[in-house]
Image: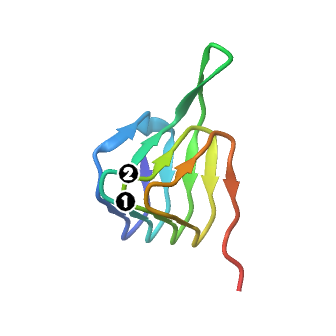
Amino acid sequence: MKIGKHAHINTTNISDAALIEIGDKVTIGGSATIFAHYASKGYLVVAPVRIRDGATVGIKATVMGDVEIGEGVMVGPHDVVMPKSRLEAVTK
């Protein structure tokens, strides 16, 4: 797992760590679940998860495989980020 500077990870529910990239100043909320896999049509699909700089994953949120969470994006508490999701960076 690649973890950026000043990241705060408040969960132990992380699977497939070799395929997870967490950027600088990211916050992962308590009891959030991050895993780099999902099932599709009877097959296990393994794909990376990228959480970009300044993003937040809320308490008890779930992030599945083949997901990119953009810079500054906030995933709310209890949200589920489905496979192949691309949450775009916050623009000013």
Q: Position of residue 90 (x, y in %)?
A: 66, 75
Q: Is residue 45 left or right of residue 35?
A: right
Residue 25 is tagged as: none
Q: Helix, strand or loop at disc 2?
A: loop
Give the residue displayed 45% in from the left and 37% down from the top. 18
Q: Is residue 50 left or right of residue 20?
A: right
Q: Is residue 9 left or right of residue 1?
A: left
Farthest front residue in view:
78
Looking at numbered disc 2 in the image, what kind of residue is underneath it?
A: Ala
Alpha carbons under labels 2 and 1: distance apart: 5 Å
Looking at numbered disc 1 in the image, what kind of residue is underneath it?
A: Ile
Give the residue displayed 53% in from the left and 48% down from the top. 80
Label 1 sits on residue: 59
Q: Position of residue 44 (x, y in %)?
A: 58, 19
Q: Is residue 38 left or right of residue 13?
A: right
Q: Please determine whether, in this image, residue 83 is positioned above or below residue 41.
A: below
- First along the sequence among labels 2 and 1: 2
Q: Position of residue 3 (x, y in %)?
A: 41, 56
Q: Where, quadrant-wise, is the N terminus in this rendering?
A: top left
Which of 71/80 is in front? 80
Residue 32 is tagged as: 2
Q: Helix, strand or loop at disc 1?
A: loop
Farthest top residue in view:
42
Give the residue displayed 69% in from the left and 41% down from the top. 84
Q: Please determine whether, in this image, residue 17 is positioned above or below residue 53.
A: above
Crowd rating for badge 2 (residues with CA inside 10 Å; few <14, some 14–19, many 20+)? many
Do tag 2 and tag 1 residues touch (Cβ < 8 Å)?
Answer: yes
Q: Position of residue 55 (x, y in %)?
A: 52, 67
